[in-house]
């Protein structure tokens, strides 16, 4: 892997993280008025319709049969796992709280990249990733008065599933392309989503304010679809472990979004935790990571 590819991968990754940083605040808007599973499955189904139209217009070839197990991991991670678990968690905790816990995602992505994409991070890289993750756990324990809230467990489940979805999507993107991977993942998952979503809507309804619907459109079209275009491209170019570390910037951006969009009050300790976690990005960025085939 060339330095130019790594730099381009990091730029794509930063762009995607800026998009993803507003996902939790937008989701918090939605789940305050709409059943969390309706929001989670609905965002995927809406994104799938747009993805299907794009695939049809561009006449993109279908994935190979041998790629289908990989798509199952992507679907379980970023199409179903992350949206469902975060939506459940955000019924109980603020978006700013969720942002700090989800900051552990780079570690999950690095582990998944090692297992699925063949990346081989150095010891220094792992120490930096573990340091950032330890800060995240400390924050969750501090917020929970020494115990982890059930919402924190849901957020951790979101992180684990998403990490594998990211790593597998990056592996597939090396020969399929970033937007093709997320598009096919959504389209393949769509038939499974329809009946459960229809039942949930019949049971709970979807009455919501215009503000909540705007939040839903953001998580459906931007977070669930458009954001993955630069994200998977960046991971494929710069490596899962290396570019995945850029996610540690996401909590800081999400804190700003939570304050502006939701009016959440952020105390000094929250900012200090965010700054400390972000500092590990600079350290991790300097540590060597061997790429598969590189």
Image (cartoon, helix red, strand yellow):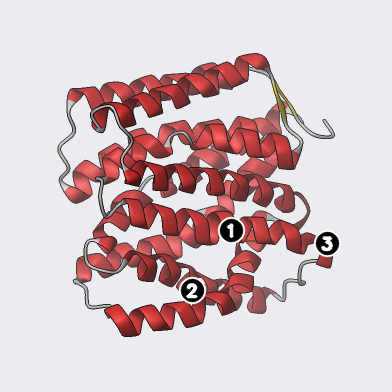
Q: Nearer the viewer, mark 2 or mark 1?
A: 1
- The residue shown at (43%, 78%) is 197
Does the image show residue 31?
Answer: yes
Mark 3 highlights which residue? Answer: 66
Mark 2 highlights which residue? Answer: 45
Q: Quadrant of the C terminus?
A: top right
Mark drawn on residue 262: none
Residue furthest to the front: 147
Mark 1 highlights which residue? Answer: 76
Q: Is residue 111 left or right of residue 250?
A: right
- The residue shown at (28%, 21%) is 272
Place residue 144 in its image quadrant: top left
Q: Nearer the viewer, mark 1 or mark 3?
A: 1
Q: Please provide percent x and percent y for residue 239.
A: 68, 35
CA gap, disc 3 to disc 2?
Answer: 25 Å
Crowding near the residue tagged with mark 2, few <14, some 14–19, many ≥20 C-alpha atoms within 10 Å:
many
Q: Please report contact status of discs 3 and 2: CB closer than 8 Å, yes or no.
A: no
Under circle 3, the secondary element is: helix
Crowding near the residue tagged with mark 1, few <14, some 14–19, many ≥20 C-alpha atoms within 10 Å:
some
Q: Is residue 134 left or right of residue 173?
A: left
Q: Earlier in the sequence, mark 2 or mark 1?
A: 2
Under circle 2, the secondary element is: helix
CA gap, disc 2 to disc 1?
Answer: 14 Å
Q: Please provide percent x and percent y for residue 85.
A: 42, 54
Under circle 1, the secondary element is: helix
Q: 140 or 174: which is nearer to us?
A: 140
């Amino acid at each position: 892997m060339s330095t130019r590819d790594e730099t381009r991968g990091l730029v794509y990754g930063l762009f995607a993280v800026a998009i993803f940083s507003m996902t939790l605040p937008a989701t918090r808007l939605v789940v305050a008025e709409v059943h969390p599973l309706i929001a989670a499955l609905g965002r995927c189904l809406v994104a799938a319709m747009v993805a299907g139209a794009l695939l049809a217009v561009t006449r993109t070839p279908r994935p190979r049969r041998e790629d289908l197990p990989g798509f199952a991991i992507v679907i379980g991670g970023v199409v179903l796992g992350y949206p469902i678990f975060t939506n459940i968690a955000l019924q109980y905790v603020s978006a700013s709280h969720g942002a700090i816990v989800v900051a552990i995602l780079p570690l999950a992505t690095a582990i998944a990249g090692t297992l699925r994409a063949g990346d081989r991070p150095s010891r220094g890289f792992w120490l930096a990733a573990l340091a950032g993750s330890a800060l995240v756990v400390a924050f969750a324990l501090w917020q929970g008065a020494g115990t982890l809230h059930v919402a924190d467990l849901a957020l951790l489940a979101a992180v684990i599933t998403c990490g594998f979805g990211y790593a597998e999507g990056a592996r597939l993107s090396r020969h399929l392309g970033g937007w093709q991977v997320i598009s096919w993942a959504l389209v393949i998952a769509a038939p499974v989503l329809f009946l459960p979503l229809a039942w949930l809507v019949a049971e709970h309804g979807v009455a919501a304010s215009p503000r909540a619907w705007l939040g839903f459109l953001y998580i459906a079209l931007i977070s669930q679809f458009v954001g993955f275009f630069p994200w998977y491209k960046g991971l494929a170019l710069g490596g899962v472990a290396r570019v995945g570390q850029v996610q540690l910037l996401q909590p800081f951006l999400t804190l700003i979004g939570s304050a502006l969009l939701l009016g959440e009050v952020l105390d000094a300790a929250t900012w200090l935790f965010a700054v400390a976690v972000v500092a590990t990005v600079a350290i991790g960025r300097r540590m060597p990571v061997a790429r598969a085939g590189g």
